[in-house]
Amino acid sequence: MTPDLVTGIYDASLLDGNILFAIGVIFLFAFILINFVAVFAGICTYAERKVAGHMQARVGPYVVGPHGILQWLADAVKLILKEDIIPEKADRFLFRAAPYVVFAGSFVCWVALPFAPDLSPAALDVGVLYIIAFGSSVVLGILMAGWASGNKWAMFGAMRSAAQIVSYEVPTGLTILAIVMIVGSLNMHEISRAQAAGLPFLGGTDWHLGIGSWFIFRYPPFTIFAALILYICALAETNRVPFDIPEAESELVAGYHTEYTGFRFSIFFLSEYANMFVVSAIVATLFLGGWLPPFGKPFGDHFYETTSEKTGSLAGQGVETADGWKLARQGSVVLVSVGERPKHSIPLADGSTVFELTESTGRRVTIDGDKIKVEDGKIVSGVWAASLFGEWAPLVRILEGMAWFFGKCFFLVFVMMWLRWTIPRYRVDQLMDLCWKKLTPLAFINLFAVGLLHWAIGG
Amino acid sequence: METSKLLVNVIFYAVAAFAVVSAFGVALSKNIVRSAFALLAVLFSAAALYALMKADFIFAIQILVYVGGILVLIIFAIMLTQRIVDVNLSNPSVPTAPAVAVVICVLLILVGVLLANSGELPKATAPQAVADKPMTSVVGEMLMRDYLYPFEIVSVLLLACLIGAAFLARKEVKEG
């Protein structure tokens, strides 16, 4: 398992017997995260209106603060001060519980996001699966809100939303499966890291080819389609335009949150924006390299630390590692094979290396004349950064990773806003048609094609 | 290690108590929709118990399948029935006498099993755990290697169910 910052501190303090400190760490990170979500959602409401304004040749909010930049704070204050109305016909308990269920469903997904190399509040081994699972539990909050409102428009909105989210989970799952198949892990960090490995049909051993080695370009054109399918499904799962039929103002007043006012209403808004970020983060991690930079090597580049090594002679049998790699000379190259299948070939020049990246570990092969050395080791941060920043290098590496990750996510969130003000809304039947008759078969074809290509050239 | 055990125990009892209370909610609520939402709490606490046992894969699957799939379908089915807009829809319950009888029988069986094992429940044999392998890959390898035939048979069964459901739900196309 990848050690990560928060789990590391938490485990260490537990081992010291410092139980209160361990609990404090959890609460501290949860506090930071939840405030970040709130601020992010607030700024998104401002950004959304600014984007809308400029797309329609208006200026958007302009009064509170320079260029209206404090508008979201003013809105938050206004929403908190509004009267909290619970309709007479509502189921009071469920009506009040629903916003929390919706918000909890989208907030817990943030815990597994890979914000930077080895930094996520919990680097779960089942990361992607966890996010998909909890993302789907938002539906229940929406159903709860719709039903408890005691209003048929709210009810219709909730039913539409649930049908839509459940349906679009199918192509989402299938596209994610394609990536999980390539990586062989559900861990978000490993998925990010695996995208530093270079294109298989260009040799695949060079790492940090930047944009070219992201999964979106791994097996073109299929992975490009997969990324598009996933992004379209992400739009549907967050109930965004063009798939916002659960909120369709012209038909359903405001959908499942019709009856909500004041702060409870704003919690629905909060969770919508939190959800937008989560789905963008999934697309960014799975297809756009997560915290990897779009060109060349990361600034806080890694260096290699050997943990075990094995040497052999090329004149004889070559080397065989514990997990079944065979390295032997064949003509003018050293052939690396796993079981019966050849994996790489290394020209017989001095000091050639090949990396096999798994998790944060890598394997390095060094050839020197007739001697061959296979090292297993860890990739640790920082040659460049270490020379420039000394002991601050790990921090620089994390900040750099965060910058790339958030940059990609914010861009995808921006595209969602952009689409909202560009595309008209789908009808209910068109929406289902798109999901079941177009996206799902396409996702199946993609899955099959990616599997085939990976088997043929990626292995 | 002691303190971490204490922490796990505290969380365990809290979650287990929550599960039991919500299970009572499912059984006793007069309102069928409220029962369904209480089931949500039960399923979540079951998932939390899996997480406590470090069964991360089962934990995620529990949420994905039971909460995101089955429970949503249950609530959907309830909501598609008539008079659902009426919030005070009630939940016709089985007469008390047979219900109590069934509950007592089940309780007796459970206590019997517990006593027969002298307080020690049979332990599941853990798969040959590989230290640095995540649980998902262990489960996957077992499904594809040791339990391939059962796995395939179950998937054929599920496929048959799907086809059957699609057959039952389809619209008859009238000829001519």
Image (spheres, helix red, strand yellow):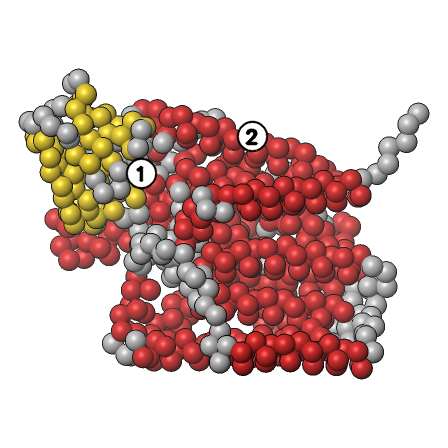
Give the mark nearer the N terminus: 1 vs 2: 1
In the rendered image, residue B171, in percent from the top left (x then y), is placed at 84, 38
Q: Is residue B75 visible?
A: yes
The image quadrant that residue B63 belongs to is bottom right
At label 2, counting other C-alpha atoms closer than 10 Å, the crowd grade (few under 14, some 14-19, many 20 or more) is some
In the rendered image, residue A198, in percent from the top left (x then y), is placed at 31, 32
Q: Quadrant of the C terminus of chain A?
A: top left
The reply to whether the C-beta atoms of the residues labelled 1 and 2 are less than 8 Å apart is no
Disc 1 marks a residue whose amino acid type is Ala
Q: Residue furthest top?
A: A331
Q: Count all numbered tags in the image, as a single digit.
A: 2
Residue sitting at x 69%, y 81% = B104
Pointer 1 chain? A
Disc 2 marks a residue whose amino acid type is Ile
> Could you give the CA–CA distance between mark 1 and mark 2, rounded to whole angstroms?
26 Å
The image quadrant that residue A376 belongs to is top left
Which type of secondary structure does the marked residue at label 2 adopt?
Answer: helix
Which type of secondary structure does the marked residue at label 1 adopt?
Answer: loop
At label 1, counting other C-alpha atoms closer than 10 Å, the crowd grade (few under 14, some 14-19, many 20 or more) is many
The image quadrant that residue A57 belongs to is top right
Residue sitting at x 30%, y 33% = A339
In the rendered image, residue A397, in percent from the top left (x then y), is placed at 25, 51
Pointer 2 chain? A
Residue sitting at x 60%, y 77% = B110
Q: Which residue is mark 1?
A: A196
- Left or right of B96, for residue A136: left
- Left or right of A353, for residue A108: right
Q: Which mark is residue A445?
A: 2
Residue sitting at x 78%, y 40% = B167
| Same chain letter for marks 1 and 2 | yes
In the rendered image, residue A129, in percent from the top left (x then y), is placed at 49, 52
Residue B9 vs A37, above or below: the answer is: below
